[in-house]
Image (cartoon, helix red, strand yellow):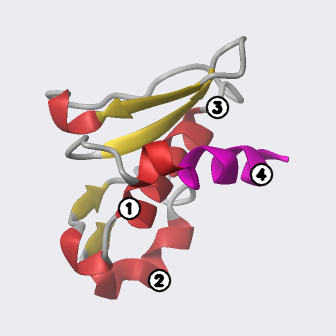
């Protein structure tokens, strides 16, 4: 189910043709309207919360939004995973300018 929601957000013309520098699919509001944000306007990002509150889902949505909108050579990210368990999937993208520690 979650994959279909993300797909519904990032496959729209509104997202694909966005004028945002770094567009991210945030989600949908209670009326079913799609919400997008430009993380290029944000000075930094912090994702915190209690266990099972959706932090990993949020981070994966941000990463997926960027990777779906740009070529791998256009994206450079440094991802720090202190527990070394959340970002294991992205280790295989290391050749695509992503550094995961």
User: Could you tell whether 88 is left or right of 74 in the image?
Assistant: right
Callout 1 environment at 10 Å: few (<14), some (14 to 19), or many (20+)?
Answer: some
* CA gap, disc 2 and disc 1: 19 Å
User: Observer-nearest residue: 45 or 74?
Assistant: 74
Q: Is residue 77 above or below residue 18?
A: below
Q: Earlier in the sequence, mark 3 or mark 1?
A: 3
- The residue tagged 1 is 69
One can see residue 62 in this view? no
Q: Are marks 3 and 2 in contact (CB under 8 Å)?
A: no
Magenta residues span 1-12
Label 4 environment density (alpha carbons within 10 Å; few <14, some 14–19, many ≥20): few
Disc 3 to disc 4: CB gap under 8 Å: no
**CA separation, marks 2 and 4?**
23 Å
- Give the residue at mark 3: 54
Q: Is residue 1 visible?
A: yes
Name the residue that disc number 2 marks.
92
What secondary structure is found at the residue carrying circle 3? loop
**Alpha-carbon distance for marks 1 and 4?**
17 Å
């Amino acid at each position: 189910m979650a994959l279909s929601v993300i797909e519904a957000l990032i496959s729209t013309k509104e997202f694909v043709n966005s004028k945002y520098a770094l567009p991210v699919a945030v989600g949908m509001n209670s009326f079913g309207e799609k919400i997008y944000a430009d993380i290029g306007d944000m000075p930094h990002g912090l994702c915190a919360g209690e266990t099972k509150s959706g932090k990993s889902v949020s981070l994966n949505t941000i990463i997926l939004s960027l990777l779906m909108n740009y070529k791998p050579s256009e994206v450079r990210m440094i991802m720090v995973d202190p527990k070394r368990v959340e970002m294991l999937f992205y280790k295989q993208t290391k050749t695509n300018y992503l550094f995961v520690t």
